[in-house]
Amino acid sequence: MKTRKVAIITGGSQGIGAGLVSTFRELGYAVVANSRSITASEHSDVITVPGDISDPAVAGRVISTAMEQFGRIDTLVNNAGIFIGKPFTEYTQEDYNNILQVNLGGFFHITQKTIAQMVEQGAGHVVNVTTTLVEFANSSAPSALASLTKGGLSSVTKSLAIEYAGRGIRVNAVSLGVIHTPMHPEETHGTLAGWHPVGRIGTIDDVTHGVLYLEQAPFVTGEILHIDGGQSAGS
């Protein structure tokens, strides 16, 4: 009997994260989903672990749950993150602490523990979620702390891809433009669409299709796949 694959999705309660949970289920994976506010799933192949992923203890519970329930971890999607957009000189110490804890701390603890398990298995795939604002800054969207943290994820994607390429572990990223989620009120969509050369904002399906491509592309590692309507190419 073919062993069922297992995916961990952080930030899995709504928006892109919820879309990723559904996508991996449809692909036949069992899923362990985490977010601060996540509730129990009605699906037996989805186990939820509530808590702040920046807490090492929560990251540990996510890993132990995956292993106890399903016995393996094949894919980790680091989707959890926060965005605080304001002029650089207006950021507070609290802003700084929060965004570093979630965007970097949340990545570090779960990824370190996951890769350790993947090394034992001899295979695995990590996908990080970052933003095209890292490379294509926009004066209408001041976002220095997002660039500071998500830029780090873009860099570490390549670093880990090379470090673990010989051990069967791939590491990739998706770099997003503006995506249609509850974070962006409907009245802003017209303006936000104008930021993208294709003339629209992205959908959750756009993101899940990109992650699915990376998941099913075994010769691809160290890739930062832009799902941004052409933003990174120019304006």
Image: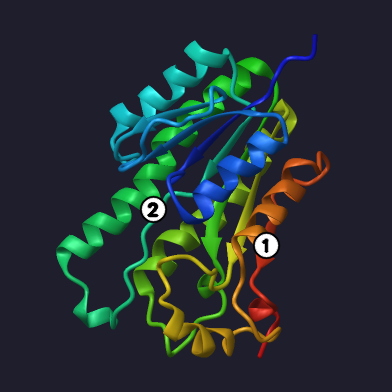
Residue 91 drawn at (x, y percent): 22, 73
With 191 as the anchor, is 227 left or right in this view? right
The N terminus, quarter of image: top right
Split into 4 quadrants, where in the image is the C terminus? bottom right
- Looking at the image, which is closer to me, 176 or 186? 186
Question: Toward which corner of the image does residue 55 lie, by quadrant?
Answer: top left
Residue reaching furthest to the left: 93
Residue 20 point in image, percent of width and height: 59, 46
The crowding category of the residue bearing disc 1, from other C-alpha atoms within 10 Å (few below 14, some 14 to 19, many at least 20), is some
Along the polypeptide, which appears first: circle 1 or circle 2?
Answer: 2
Q: Mark 1–mark 2 contact, CB under 8 Å? A: no
Give the residue at x 42% y 26%. Answer: 62
Amino acid type indicated by mark 2: Asn
What amino acid type is highlighted by mark number 1?
Asp
Left or right of 81, for residue 199: right
> In terms of secondary structure, where does tag 1 sit?
helix
Q: Position of residue 68 (x, y in %)?
A: 48, 11
Q: Give the Cα separation between the discs numbered 1 and 2.
A: 22 Å
Which residue is painted at 36% across and 39% down in the image?
38
- At 71% from the left and 29% from the top, the residue drawn is 28
Using the rendered view, name the quadrant where residue 223 is placed. bottom right
What's the residue at 51%, 71% (across, down)?
134
Q: Nearer the viewer, residue 74 or 153?
A: 74
Q: Residue furthest front?
A: 42
Q: Residues within 10 Å of mark 2 (few under 14, many from 20)?
A: many
- Residue under label 1: 206
Indicate the position of residue 109 as horizontal and vertical percent values.
39, 35
203 and 235: which is toward the camera: 203
- Label of residue 103 in the image: 2
